[in-house]
Image: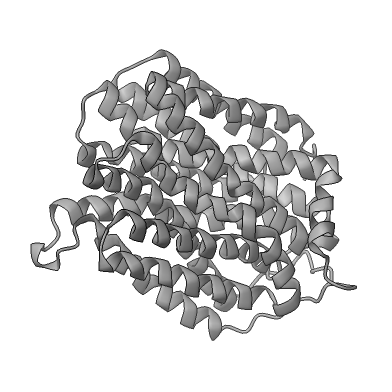
């Protein structure tokens, strides 16, 4: 069913969907949480990086099956299921912060986020017109980023200022986000959203994976891997860079993670307007150029302000990469939205690959090794730029 290009989604439908995008941002708490768990339990970088790696491992397992599930039960019901799983993941840390308990909690967080990322983006595509899709997805990422950059502040407040009798410390961020998840579940459930039905029978697992045989879909899939690898990598490495090179403590260095998400949030907000006036290809090139300059700076220069500036550039540059790649892939095969969405979200498995490689590299040669791993992803995105359609 082709949507009217002049159609404007009602706020009654858009607001609860955007609240779900906020809940989608809960997954980014794993970056700062892994640093606190590392300090609490005395873990190495490689051991601590297992937490974000485990969160994003589930994208490899559940993304394509979630795309198939959507074809059978609908996108809204799949989003509701994802919120319930996310709620469970936020409940577990209230019972302690042991290593295995946190592994289970982060696993559930990853599974819930896999379900949500796979189903929420195409759910948004049912209530906005095709040509507004990139800017709408970018605005959703802006809302998601608000939750992302709030997590380090909430954790730091809990660690230093929260009421001692609560006995939670940095884990106070879990009940805060859990409350928002409950509101999102009830609000979305009460919101009527009409979904178009796909023609023919739902695709099988093999048919979904076969779409990777299309060159542009494969290139976009790898692009998502690199995007999320840079995202999670910066999220976890930024505080470590300041601790290694400037000698900051963890509570002070945690600001670097918030700085990244502040600029990523600003980039998403501005991108939702810029993409209405500038071609996706040109904006993507400008964004990647910022990240090239930033990783170059982190590899060659030291100093607190230089590190802050580079982290900010990566945050701003990486802010619109996902929405542009995702929308390009959906527009390439509009008749296979659910399947393409599953494949693109499976690319978030890059959040497993990059932190593992970065943890090994940083244990071997310091945080500069972690930055070098991120640089590989940035260079790939630079090459992907020239495969984006010249006209949106």
Give the camera-side residue of 202 and 224. 202
Q: Is residue 280 visible?
A: yes
Give the camera-side residue of 106 and 374. 106
Question: Where, quadrant-wise, is the C terminus in this rendering?
Answer: top right
Q: Is residue 309 left or right of residue 61?
A: left
In this view, the residue farthest toward the right is 200
Find residue 123 and report its horizontal and vertical position in percent.
66, 69
388, above or below 163, in the image: above
Q: Is residue 227 left or right of residue 41?
A: right
- Residue at figure coordinates x 19%, y 57% from the top left: 169
229, above or below 144, in the image: above
Question: Where, quadrant-wise, is the N terminus in this rendering?
Answer: bottom right
Residue 288 falls in image quadrant: top right
Residue 64 falls in image quadrant: bottom right
In this view, the residue farthest toward the front is 100
Q: Is residue 118 left or right of residue 93?
A: right
31, above or below 308, in the image: below
Find residue 129 and report its horizontal and vertical position in percent.
73, 64
Q: Is residue 22 visible?
A: no
265, above or below 306, in the image: below
- Residue at figure coordinates x 43%, y 44% from the top left: 50
In this view, the residue farthest toward the top is 300
- Residue at figure coordinates x 71%, y 36% from the top left: 281
Find residue 109 and report its horizontal and vertical position in percent.
46, 61
């Amino acid at each position: 069913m082709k949507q009217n290009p002049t159609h404007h989604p009602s706020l009654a439908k858009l607001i609860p969907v955007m609240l779900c995008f906020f809940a989608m941002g809960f997954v980014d708490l794993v970056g700062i949480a892994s640093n606190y768990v590392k300090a609490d339990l005395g873990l190495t970088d490689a051991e601590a990086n297992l937490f974000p790696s485990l969160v994003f491992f589930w994208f490899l397992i559940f993304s394509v099956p979630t795309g198939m599930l959507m074809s059978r039960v609908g996108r809204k019901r799949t989003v509701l299921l994802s919120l319930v799983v996310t709620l469970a993941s936020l409940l577990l840390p209230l019972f302690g912060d042991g290593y295995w308990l946190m592994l289970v909690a982060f696993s559930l967080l990853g599974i819930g986020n896999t379900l949500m990322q796979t189903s929420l983006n195409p759910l948004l595509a049912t209530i906005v017109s095709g040509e507004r899709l990139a800017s709408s997805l970018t605005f959703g990422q802006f809302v998601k980023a608000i939750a992302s950059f709030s997590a380090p502040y909430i954790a730091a407040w809990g660690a230093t200022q929260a009421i001692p009798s609560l006995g939670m410390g940095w884990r106070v961020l879990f009940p805060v986000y859990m409350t928002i998840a409950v509101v999102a579940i009830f609000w979305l459930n009460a919101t009527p959203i009409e979904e178009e039905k796909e023609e023919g029978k739902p695709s099988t697992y093999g048919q979904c994976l076969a779409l990777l045989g299309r060159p542009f879909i494969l290139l976009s899939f790898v692009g998502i891997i690199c995007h999320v690898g840079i995202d999670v990598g910066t999220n976890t490495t930024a505080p470590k860079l300041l601790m290694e090179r400037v000698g900051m403590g963890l509570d002070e260095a945690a600001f670097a993670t918030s700085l990244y998400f502040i600029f990523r949030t600003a980039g998403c907000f501005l991108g939702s307007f810029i993409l209405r006036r500038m071609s996706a290809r040109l904006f993507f090139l400008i964004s990647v150029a910022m990240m090239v300059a930033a990783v170059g700076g982190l590899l060659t220069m030291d100093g607190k302000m230089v590190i802050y500036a580079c982290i900010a550039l990566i945050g701003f540059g990486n802010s619109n990469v996902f929405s542009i790649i995702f929308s390009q892939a959906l527009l390439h095969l509009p008749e296979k939205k659910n399947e393409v969405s599953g494949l693109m979200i499976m690319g978030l498995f890059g959040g497993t690959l990059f932190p593992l490689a970065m943890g090994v590299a940083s244990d071997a040669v310091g945080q500069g090794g972690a930055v070098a791993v991120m640089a590989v992803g940035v260079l790939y995105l630079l090459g992907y730029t020239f495969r984006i359609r010249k006209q949106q």
